[in-house]
Amino acid sequence: MIGCGTGVRIAAVRLGGPLGCAWLYAHADDAIHVETTRGDGMTGWARRIGGVAAITGTVGVAACDGASDGLKEVQRVRSGDLTIVVLADDGELNKGTDAFVVEFRTADGTLVDAGTVRTSANMPMGSRTMPGNVQVERSDIPGRYRATGEFGMAGGWQMTVEWNGAIGRGSVSFDGTVE
């Protein structure tokens, strides 16, 4: 089974030889566990297949670190050394109630915990402004925040993301589009 999440078994491979067998478990928490037992050996072909499976499982673990779980980028903005990335299932923010993700990344792309995060969205309408309602909460992955927005209309929106945590206090404003 391949998936992301703590404790999820990515690969279980039996590597055998004349002295016994070794079971290699790769977990999504980046730990690799080995159990050895005495027993019959495996053929060279089966050991090669097991090695490929172990490598594939390890790559699966590495790919889950900071991955966006199939989400598509909506927008990317910079503020100093931080990059703030807005992601959604379909790569768009949509009119009505819409779920999306806000990520904070360092210059090398590593997710970084931004502490308390708030967002706002306002649609300028001549001399008035129509506010959107955006709620943000931490996810299980430091640096990734789940958001739900209420956008009353499609069109151009002025978005602001504010944060306050160990990386400091800051904000970034940008123009976004709601479909």
Image (tube, rainbow, N blue to C red):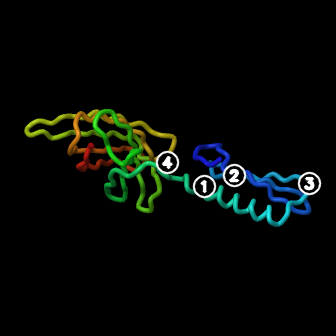
User: Which residue lies at the image location 80% right of the left edge and 59% below the top edge?
Assistant: 15
Q: Return the x and y of residue 141 as percentages of the image width and height.
A: 50, 45
Residue carrying label 3: 39
The reply to whether discs 1 and 2 touch (Cβ–Cβ < 8 Å) is yes
> From the viewer's perspective, is 134 left or right of 1?
left
Residue carrying label 2: 11
User: Which residue lies at the image location 64% right of the left edge and 44% below the top edge?
Assistant: 8
Q: Residue furthest left?
A: 127
Element at label 3: loop
Q: Return the x and y of residue 33 as percentages of the image width and height.
A: 74, 52
Residue carrying label 1: 60
Q: Pick whichever of labels 2 and 4 is earlier in the sequence.
A: 2
Is 149 or 94 nearer to us in this picture?
94
Mark 4: few/some/many CA within 10 Å (<14, 14-19, 20+): few
The reply to whether discs 2 and 4 touch (Cβ–Cβ < 8 Å) is no
The CA span between labels 2 and 3 is 21 Å
Q: Pick whichever of labels 4 and 1 is earlier in the sequence.
A: 1
The reply to whether discs 4 and 3 touch (Cβ–Cβ < 8 Å) is no
Element at label 1: helix
The CA span between labels 2 and 4 is 19 Å
Q: Return the x and y of residue 45 as percentages of the image width and height.
A: 80, 65
Element at label 2: strand
Identity of the amino acid at label 1?
Answer: Gly
Mark 1: few/some/many CA within 10 Å (<14, 14-19, 20+): some
Identity of the amino acid at label 4?
Answer: Asp
The CA span between labels 4 and 1 is 12 Å
Is 5 or 110 nearer to us in this picture?
5
Residue carrying label 4: 69
Identity of the amino acid at label 2?
Answer: Ala
Q: Return the x and y of residue 123 as percentages of the image width and height.
A: 19, 40
